Amino acid sequence: MIIFKKAADIHNYLLIKMEENQSIGFVPTMGALHEGHISLIIKSKAANSLTVCSIFVNPTQFNNPLDFEKYPITIESDISMLEEAGCDVLFLPSTTEIYPEEFVKINYELGYLESILEGKYRPGHFQGVCMVVERLLRIIPCNTLYLGQKDYQQCMVIEKMISLRNMDVHLVIAPTVRESDGLAMSSRNRRLSKDERQNATVIFSALMYMKSNIANLSNENIIYEAKKMISEKGFDIDYVELTDCHLNPLENTTSRNGIVALIAASVNKIRLIDNMTLINPIK
Ligand code: PAF
């Protein structure tokens, strides 16, 4: 695996690969890699001749400074995992490579996506995500961008940013990878104590409960019961919501748009999110 630290170097290297008609898949990450990230590398490798991963803990997307400080850094094991998965290129930039002095910040018109769910609880977060992903895509010429469904709203925000900025990149959203007990893989899981880790499976149980009951209980009842399950395990709930596949409230949509359940809850200031498609949209 070739490791680049300078934006200009990786950019020039990949431009040549593009001119040679190689197809390039790109997996952006903030490191602390787990099987969820590796599944994206594997997906990209299956469809492209070159797979690029980036590791950059982006300060502009952390609305909570404590979360930024505590974000796990495991660069050595990240590199071995990427090598083992057969990733071809790693971009490992410093903050000044991503945000040089001349970097001009813009405002992304994300509409309702910015004020609901994660947007409501993490003000400014999605502006920071767009800022870094657009910058990475300008540095890393690629055909396809791979993201995980675990960050459902992030996927929609990035899709919107790609269209707002007229970027020529195809987006692939890969299914959430789960631990054997259902907990969605996340870099934050490693901050959980043994008990918290055990209790965290309630988020998956609540989603499964919602999936099993969506056809026979009212939405209000389902949300009420799911919240009860989660708070009984000591989690503070930010939201338990049912929306359509575009994250519109169910009362403003049609059944063709499917149903997604989304949860955000914290224990001991460790915030976990997860989601599940309960009913698929009709394409
Ligand atoms: O999902 C993440 O890890 C980050 O939000 C991303 C997409 C790498 C941007 O920093």
Image (cartoon, rainbow, N blue to C red):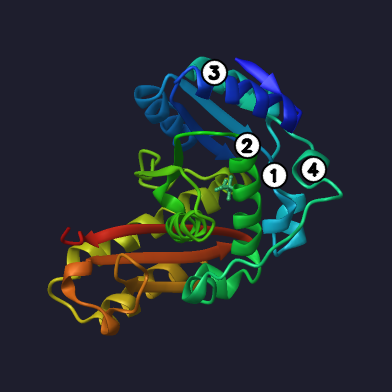
Q: Which amino acid is tagged 4?
A: Thr
* Real-space CA distance between mark 4 and mark 1, rounded to the nearest whole angstrom: 9 Å
Q: Residues within 10 Å of mark 1 (few under 14, many from 20)?
A: many
Look at discs 4 and 1 and give the one toward the viewer: 4
Quarter of the figure with residue 202? bottom left
Instruction: Specify whether 133 is left or right of 67.
Output: left
Q: Residue at x 69, y 28 (%)?
A: 75
Residue 57 is marked as 1
Q: Residue at x 22, y 68 (%)?
A: 257
Numbered disc total = 4
Q: Is mark 1 within 8 Å of ligand 1?
A: yes
Q: Which amino acid is tagged 1?
A: Val
Residue 88 is marked as 3
Q: Earlier in the sequence, mark 4 or mark 3?
A: 3
Q: Which residue is mark 4?
A: 95
The percent coordinates of residue 261 (x first, y second) are 33, 66
